[in-house]
Amino acid sequence: MDWFNTIIRTFFDFGAMAEVLPQLLAVGLLNTLIISVAATVLGTVLGMVVAVMGISPSKWLRVPARIYTDLFRGLPAILTILLIGQGFARLSQSIFGPSPYPLGIIALSLIASAYIGEIFRAGILSVDKGQGEACRALSMSYAKSMALVVVPQGVRRVLPALVNQFIAIIKDSSLVYFLGLLVSERELFRVGQDAAVLSGNLSPLVAAGVFYLVITVPLTHLVNHIDNKFRTGRRRPAPPTSGLKEVKDLEAASPLTAGSNT
Amino acid sequence: MNTPTPTKNTTGQEAPTFHGSSLELRNLTMAYGDIEVLRNVSLTVAPGTTTCIIGPSGSGKSTLLRGINRLHEPKSGDVLLAGDTILGTNPDTLRTRIGMVFQHFNLFPDHTAEENVALALWAVKGMPKAQAMAKARQRLAEVGLAERADHRPRDLSGGQQQRVAIARALAMEPEVMLFDEATSALDPELVKGVLNLMAGLGRRGMTMLVVTHEMGFARRVADQVVFMDEGEVVEAGTPTQLFDNPRSERLQRFLSEVL
């Protein structure tokens, strides 16, 4: 049972875990949540802009959206984060101060928006063409028919895919540590990593991993819940009713057909 | 000028009357890319009359309707609404004057029946939402759906959905109504109710252009019947002329297939 003890000591040293726990909670979890939530909000807003540009009738909007998407979806996340985090460090310093934290959030947002844009675009395109036509026939402008009818339906359809993307953002937030964070800015991974190096034991990293799971696993179940809710629909349960009864009711109730000679 | 004036009828409920405008097509030609699907169609629809367009599939009937409200831009020719050309105007303004009802209803699934009717009223006409909803319920009552105003489309039968769609178009107070095979997707027992509703609109003064496969309706309700085939008007006239005395060989063959 020697190997078993080795495994326990390497990965599940509860003493080492307990030691790092306050930091994981107060610094790591907090920063991971701040980075993820900020990148999710920014990425979703940007993603919607990219999606709407991507389905625009004008190629002057469509082509830039396409290039943007190809670029940020095609590059490794770590490369984008480093290029933006270091490339714009000067500019960032004059706006946000010395911390690379805001640039990390922006880089994550750009990457996320490319994926989210594609998710939104797929959702919007899946909405029946007749919906937009009905809007236009009711004299709504293209912009209004998109904003009030087509986009909300499209977004509702892709909520599960969207939540999956949010999970990816949470995991990718760990990459921001490459930019060199201040002690108080470290997110879960970095806190775990530092403690692991100091103690020569992987248990703090395992603890950090547990925190990631605590956030992401409930989210995946939320996906399933949303999916079930929207897929099974909201049709009111009703006993079978004859179409003939409906005919009778409607004829009686509808003044526009009254006096009909048939 | 299009505000329906309520009149009492036999059921004691208020039913509106309409003031339809005239519609005229002059040498209308429409194309998808290089392919002309409608060639030199000319047609006059007098105010407050019903014109039924019949013909085999692929004859350009639906395209014709879509040219009139410019969901598809005509290639050449002219469309005159109440005597004036519509081709120079902003399509969005034009469409407030022309209502359209689709084969597959195209109701907004995430809106209730009354929200479906009210949406364009506040979003386009700028009506306060409460007033738009009140007007929507009134329109729904006119098509017999007062009880179901808070239902979503999926909780309504096809016939009820099409009534909502008609109420939705009427709420904009159009001068002309276009019906694109409005009963083709309905369960058979619900067809007659919707057709009767359409006939009611016609009797109350609406100008209507009805693409339909319901020959009985065309014969009974239409003031004018137009037979189209391969993108052209082959024959036009009164229902009696077309159904009892078809001149062209193509119409004779079409009628022998559908009647």
Image (cartoon, grey):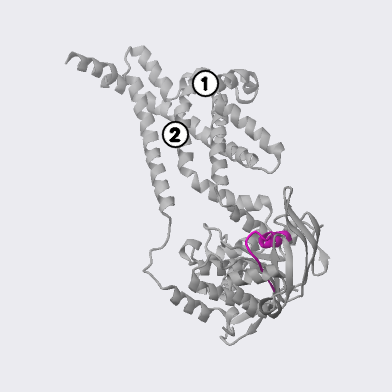
- Residue A232 in sight: yes
Task: Name the residue beneath numbered marker 1.
Answer: A78
| Up/down of B202 relative to B86, above or below | below
> Given the current orientation, which residue lies at the most extreme bottom position?
B10
Q: How many marks?
A: 2
Q: Nearer the viewer, residue A10 or A130?
A: A130
Label 1 Cα neighbours within 10 Å, binned few <14 / some 14-19 / many ≥20: some
Asked whether, in this view, residue B245 is left or right of residue A225, the answer is right
Residue range corresponding to the magenta coloring:
B51-67
Q: CA distance from mark 1 to mark 2?
A: 17 Å
**Position of B75 relative to B83 (above/below):** above
Query: Mark 2 — residue?
Result: A167
Label 2 Cα neighbours within 10 Å, binned few <14 / some 14-19 / many ≥20: many
Residue at 74% x, 66% y is B233
- In terms of image quadrants, where is residue A88? top right
Residue A136 shown left or right of residue A217 in the figure: right
For badge 1, the amino acid type reads Ile
Task: Tell me if residue B174 can be seen.
Answer: no
Q: Nearer the viewer, residue B29 or A255?
A: B29
B125 or A103, which lies in front?
Answer: B125
Q: Position of residue A23 (x, y in %)?
A: 38, 24
Q: Answer whether residue B248 is magenta in the image.
A: no
The picture places residue A49, in percent across and down from the top left corner, at 62, 39
